[in-house]
Amino acid sequence: MNVLLISTYELGHQPLSLASPAAWLRRAGANVTCVDVSVTPLTEAMVANAGLIGISVPMHTATRLALTLLPRLRATAPEAFIVCYGLYAPLNASMLRAAGADCCLGGEVEAVLTAIWQRLAAGERPPSIDTIALHRLDLIQPDRSDLPPLNRYATLVTATEMRYAGYTETTRGCKHLCRHCPVVPVYNGRFRVVPRSTVLADIRAQVAAGARHITFGDPDFLNGPGHVLPIVRAMHAEFPDVTYDVTIKIEHILRYAHLLPELRATGCIMVVSAVEALDDAILARLAKRHTRADVVRAVELLRAHDIALNATFVAFTPWTTRQLYRELLLGIAEFGLIESVAPVQYGLRLLIPAGSRLLELPDVQELIAPFDPVALAYPWQHPDPTMDELQRQVMALAQASEQCGASRSSFYQRLLDLCDQIIGPGERPIVLPEPTPIPRLSEPWYCCAEPSGNQLITTFL
């Protein structure tokens, strides 16, 4: 019985969410085909020949795309057992099931997927039970053998070169409970480590395939410093020319500032950090556990250690006034972060998905409309309609800027002009800093963003 594993979108990375379960299934004897439909066509023959179909839904955009794909999969393979798995699967189970899925899995899914295949291979129909599996797994080396080559994915771009970028994870889940984070409803403050030998074997395979940079996709790289430091030491010892980037909370940049010299010495050239806002009241509502002053200190620390910051934001929230949006733009310039912020970050609007801890806030409950099964979120409108219009215009400007390859500094200037037009003239930075290119990945999107129009009209079959 054939297995088909499908990824719809993973931020331009070669999908680890296919490679890891593929290794487990193949070890059990399954014949597995992996298809990343963001770069490879999915044919009717692939679908029709599969008895088990797994669709990875690790983020909002991937889940929206899966909803588009599922009815076609079900029509093409009516007898196949279809599983959606990933962070967004159990929380959107009713919508995914209605579109054609048989069950939805979250958490540590490899063993459950393998058990489903074993029952199907034995001629049994597995029960359609949605599961969040958080037991500890002895994860094995991912199998990337039939995934597209790294030159089809995001690359690291620096002032002098481009490097093929690999992707792996040292941990899953997160110890923290940020209210807007999609990890929280599934892992609820828990995290699981990936064996060091498994991580290093995966890195080794990707370097052999051409990677000269590795993205560590852990929700927070410093959830377990004692686990990750031996990994980057060993990686650097074996591949001294390979660079890497990690995601670290502002809170952890400050707490573990003493580790920054070693991170830089082992090849860390960039840190992604979810700054989210520069207003302390909004940060408190999101339960980020940092303040504007903390952001300033974190920026200084990273800069002192020659580590670039890739700052992400939730620029538009129900509490973001015209003045606060202006202050966000001014703060980004004041802290010298214009080159550190991708254009899309200026336009991201707060998503309130199923299971979000934001629903704990009374004013959010009063603000939201009933859950939208198409958008997979609770809709909300800003108390100031002009802010919703500004958000739409900023996103349009950001997408146009990315498509034409405009610099981040020139985009920032056009954004100031746009704000003047929509919300009225306001304060501008006295002197904009000279643009200093920093390392960045070529994929500009973000896991909690709404899918773009181009993504939603992708044809799969």
Image: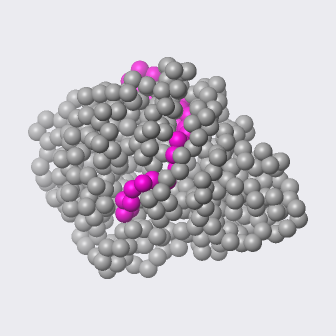
Name the one closer to the observer, 282 or 172. 172
Residue 67, percent from left and from top: 61, 65
Quadrant holding the N terminus: bottom right
Q: Is residue 255 above or below residue 434?
A: below
* Direction front: furthest residue: 226
Q: Is residue 409 magenta?
A: no
Q: Quadrant of residue 127?
A: bottom right
The residue lying at 36 percent from left, 76 percent from top is: 368
Q: Is residue 242 above or below residue 63?
A: above
Residue 183 seen in the figure:
no
Residue 367, percent from left and from top: 32, 77
Q: Is residue 269 left or right of residue 187?
A: left
Name the one closer to the observer, 321 or 183. 183
Residue 168, percent from left and from top: 55, 39
Q: Which residues are magenta?
A: 153-180
Q: Is residue 345 above or below residue 286?
A: above
Name the one closer to the observer, 7 or 429. 7
Residue 381, percent from left and from top: 33, 72
